[in-house]
């Protein structure tokens, strides 16, 4: 496996007190990534370092975006993802609704923590780009991970889901229990779903358990057999991490805001109590400004420095300069 990262900027300052955060986004979703970075940085005094993964098309653009006034003090490195890692393994395995979205190579950067952090053996926080953080990231970073576990995730059966009657999801909806390999896992089909859009991982344990190799194995197998009924990385994480994860505080992963179910959360809860908001689902706040909770996302939006302003009203009527 050949490492092919290209760093546009890498800060030399690093220490044991630094919180490392991994976020991936293709070129057409950089507006989400930059808003997320801004929200994290705005709500903590912790030492942070962001590891931002994108494609070749987005790298130069992101570098310019991160040098804008709101983000220029952020410690970061911009990484072009090595598509060779997943070529022929990931893209052929996608089935179901939204398969094109879930097939973007950047989605799978979360598989490769040891490759992205080859000389680091601490904790890493991974977040999807369609999130906003309102709490102090130090609290999330301090999540308790059991000695027997590799990472901390949230499930769909925690306190908040019950309080607001959010639909529960089970393994039986995602895994093909008619497949013998799935049956051999002996995971009850009623087991509550894991959401892979946010997690805190211990890289040492990740390496010891060969998590990357397991994620690749099940994804490649799904290209040959119907293992999962849903596209993307989440079914794979659910399979590999069964029995290997602790729980994230549910206030640190308030989900479903990209679905109509998001309307079940009271506005006061989203504004005052939720520590992390996640617009998982099809309706992203940068595309649907009226989407539930989008007013919070907009507070952290960083204007695109390369966006050309509209000039339709630049000249008054009958102006000699107007053509």
Image (spheres, rainbow, N blue to C red):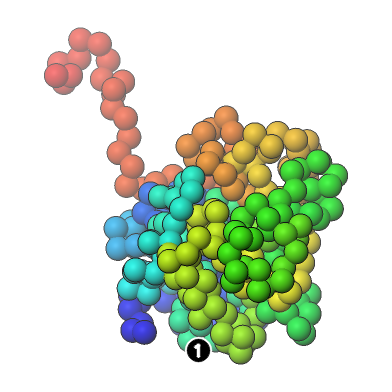
| 81 over 294 or under it: above or below | below
Reading the image, the residue beneath label 1 is 119
Measuring from the top left, give residue 254's x and y in whole percent.
Answer: 71, 50
Measuring from the top left, give residue 125's x and y in whole percent.
Answer: 61, 70
Measuring from the top left, give residue 37's x and y in whole percent.
Answer: 54, 58
Residue 275 showing in the rendered view = no
Measuring from the top left, give residue 140's x and y in whole percent.
Answer: 72, 66
**At x 39% / y 69%, what residue is drawn?**
89
**At x 60% / y 82%, what residue is drawn?**
206
Q: Secondary structure at mark 1?
A: loop
Left or right: 299 as drawn, with respect to 92: right
Q: Quadrant of residue 105?
A: bottom left
Left or right: 107 as drawn, with respect to 273: left
Q: Quadrant of residue 144?
A: bottom right
Residue 213 showing in the rendered view = yes
Question: Which of the pair 80/91 is nearer the observer?
Answer: 91
């Amino acid at each position: 496996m050949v490492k092919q990262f290209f760093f546009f900027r890498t800060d030399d300052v690093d220490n044991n007190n630094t919180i490392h955060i991994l976020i991936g986004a293709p070129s057409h979703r950089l507006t989400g990534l930059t808003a997320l970075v801004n929200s994290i940085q705005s709500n903590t005094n912790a030492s942070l370092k962001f590891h931002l993964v994108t494609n070749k098309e987005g790298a130069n653009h992101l570098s310019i975006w991160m040098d804008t006034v709101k983000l220029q003090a952020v410690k970061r490195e911009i990484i072009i993802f090595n598509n060779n890692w997943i070529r022929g393994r990931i893209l052929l395995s996608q089935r179901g609704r939204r398969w094109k979205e879930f097939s973007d190579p950047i989605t799978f950067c979360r598989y490769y923590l040891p490759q992205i952090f080859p000389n680091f053996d601490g904790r890493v926080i991974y977040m999807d780009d369609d999130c906003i953080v309102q709490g102090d990231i130090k609290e999330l970073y301090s999540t308790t991970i059991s000695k027997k576990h590799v990472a901390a995730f949230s499930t769909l059966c925690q306190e908040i889901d019950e309080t607001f009657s959010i639909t529960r999801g089970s393994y039986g909806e995602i895994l093909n229990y008619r497949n013998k390999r799935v049956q051999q896992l002996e995971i009850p089909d009623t087991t509550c779903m894991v959401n892979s859009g946010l997690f805190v991982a211990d890289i040492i344990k990740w390496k010891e358990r060969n998590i990357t190799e397991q994620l690749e194995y099940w994804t490649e197998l799904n290209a040959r057999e119907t293992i999962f009924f849903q596209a993307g990385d989440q079914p794979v994480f659910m399979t590999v991490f069964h029995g290997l994860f602790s729980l994230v505080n549910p206030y640190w992963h308030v989900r479903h805001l990209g679905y109509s179910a998001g309307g079940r959360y009271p506005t006061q809860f989203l504004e005052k109590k939720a520590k992390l908001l996640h617009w998982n689902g099809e309706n992203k706040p940068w595309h649907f400004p009226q989407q539930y909770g989008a007013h919070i996302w907009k507070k952290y939006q960083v204007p695109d420095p390369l966006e050309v302003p509209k000039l339709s009203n630049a000249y008054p009527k009958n102006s000699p300069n107007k053509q």
